[in-house]
Amino acid sequence: MTDSSPSGDIPGSGIPYRRQYLIVPREVRVPPHPSLAAHAFAGHEIHVGADLSLSTAIRGDTHVAVLGEAIDPTRPDRDNRAIADSLAQSADAADLQASAFRLAGRFVVFARIRGRNICFADACGFRRVYHGRIAERVIATSSPRLYFDILGAPVEIDAETRRLMASHLFQASEWAWYGASYFDPRLKVLLPNHGLDLESGHASRSTRTIIPQPMPIDTLVERAAKLLRGTFDGLQRRFRLTQAITAGWDSRLLLAASLPWKSEIHYFVFDEPGQPVGMDARVALALGKRAGIAVERIERPDLDPAFVAAYDQDWLMPRHISTLRNIQYHARRPAGDRPWLNVNGNAGEIGRCFFGAYGGPVWADMLLRYSGSGYESPVIERAIREWLADTRAFARQQRISILDLFYWEQRLGNWGALGMAEMDIAIEQISPYDNGELLGLMLAAPAALRKGPRYQLFERICRVLAPETLGEPINPDDSRLMSRIRANAGLRYVVQAAHQTMRGLRSRQREASEP
C-alpha cells in the first residue's frame, strides 16, 4: 500500500469545510480531519464536511454515491437514497450520465460501473468538481484549499495569471475565469457536460443528447412548467425555502413555479440601507401584493470583520464582492426545526439567449469580448481558443449555439459555480434551472421566443404557471436601447468591443499611475 499523504494533521485542520468533499483512492492515506467524516466506498474514501448529504447504492458490480442534493422533478417524493439506487441500475456510464442529467439539484455523482471509476456533477456543475493528483493518483474535491492542504504544497501561480488577477478588469468582472484549470494548473476544473475518469484523470464530453425531438411550442412550455413545479415540490419536502424576488425574468418565473407552497416559503428582496427603495424592491413588494405573499425587504448590513475572517479561511484566494453581504445575511439566519435552502436563479439565462440571438458564425474574438477581460489576457485568450476548438463539433452535433454553450460551460461552469460554492459556508443553495432536461427544452425553443427584449418563452411558461405574476413590469428602469442591444449578439459585440477598448485604456492609465 502506498502512503502518499503527509503525516500528522492536515494544515487546515481548523477549517470547517462545510458542505465540502474529497474523493481519494483507498491507497492515498488522508490524515483524519475534525471537520470531515470518512466513508469507504468502491475502493475509495469519500470525506464529507458537515451538512453535505452522502447517499450510496450498490447493484451487483455497480456502485453509486450521490453527494449533495439530487431532485427528480417527475418523482419529487424520492429522496437521495432512492435516486442513488435508481442510478445504480444504469446499464453503463453513458446511461448513468444521461439519467443524472434529467435530475435537478446540486450534486456530484461518483460511481464504479463496468469496471470504471467516474465522477461528474449536476447539469451546470454548480457542485464543483476539481481534480488533481496526489502521489500520481487522481483525486476529486470541491475545495482547492483542501486539495493543497493535503498536498502539503503552496499554490503556484505564474506571472501572467498574477497580472490578470491584479488587473482592474479582472476585479470589475467579479473574477470571471475561463478554461478547465484552476489558477494553479495542477488542479483542474470539470466543466458542465463533461465526465471525469478517476483512473486516467481524463475529462471527456458526455455523449448524451441534450436537445429533445421537435415538439409543438405549447407542449414544450407545459413540460418546462411541470419540471419547474416538480423541482419545487421536491425541494420543499426536504427544506424550508427562502427565495429572493427581483425585477428580472429569472426570479419571476421561479416565483410563478413556487406559488403552490407560498405559505411555507420565506420571500425576500435585498436592498441598500439609507437609500431610496430600489427597483428590485419596488417590483418585489408590488408582486407580493398581487400574489398574496409576504415579501421581506432586507437592507443588507455592512460586513462584520469576524464574519469576513471566517469566510476568508475557507478560501485560498477569497473573493470580496458585493454578494458577500448576502452570504453574511444567510450565515446569521437562526436555525429552525428544518434546514434552510436558498432558491437561486442562476442558469435561467441559458433559456434567454444571454449573449443575444445570432445566426452567424462565432469567432474567438467575439467570445473574448464577452468574457470581460479575455481580450486583455493571454491566459484567458488561450483557454477560450482551446475551448472553442474543442466545442465546435459538439455544438453542431447537439444543435446548440456556440454562444449558449459558452455561457453554460464557461460562464456558469466557472464564475457561476464559484458563487454557489461561496454560499456553502452559510446555507445550501440550489437553482431550479440546474436541470439538464429543462435546459434542453429551453434550448429547443426558437431563438425568436428566447431572445429579448420580450423573452416570450419565459412569459409563456409564467402564463401557464401563474399569470398573475406577469402583472408587474420586468426591470422597468432598464434602458430600452440597451435591452435591444443585448438582444442581438452581433450588435452587442460591436458595442461591447468599443466600450471595452475605452475601458482598457482607462484601466492601463490607472495601473500606470499607481505606485
Image (cartoon, grey):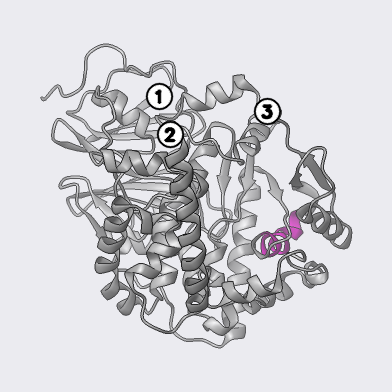
Specify the principal SS of the magenta part: helix
Reply above or below: 46 against 344. above
Instruction: Work out whether residue 135 or residue 329 is closer to the camera in this orientation and state it.
Output: 329
Judge the density around disc 3: few (<14), some (14-19), many (≥20) Cα neighbours within 10 Å.
few
Query: Residue 293 location in percent, x, y?
Result: 84, 53
| Secondary structure beneath label 3 | loop
Quick check: can you spot residue 126?
A: no
Q: Look at discs 1 and 3 and give the one toward the viewer.
A: 3
Judge whether residue 37 is colored magenta.
Answer: no
Reply above or below: 121 against 259. above
Name the disc covering residue 20, or none: 2
* Residue stretch rendered in magenta on the structure: 251-261
The amino acid type of the residue labelled 1 equals Leu
The amino acid type of the residue labelled 2 equals Gln
Judge the density around disc 2: few (<14), some (14-19), many (≥20) Cα neighbours within 10 Å.
many
Residue underneath mark 3: 332
Q: Earlier in the sequence, mark 1 or mark 3?
A: 1
Query: Residue 329 location in percent, x, y?
Result: 68, 34
- The residues tagged by marks 2 and 1 sit, at their Cα atoms, a distance apart of 8 Å
Instruction: Work out whether residue 98 or residue 90 is closer to the camera in this orientation and state it.
Output: 98
Could you tell me which residue is drawn at 46 percent across and 67 percent down? 497
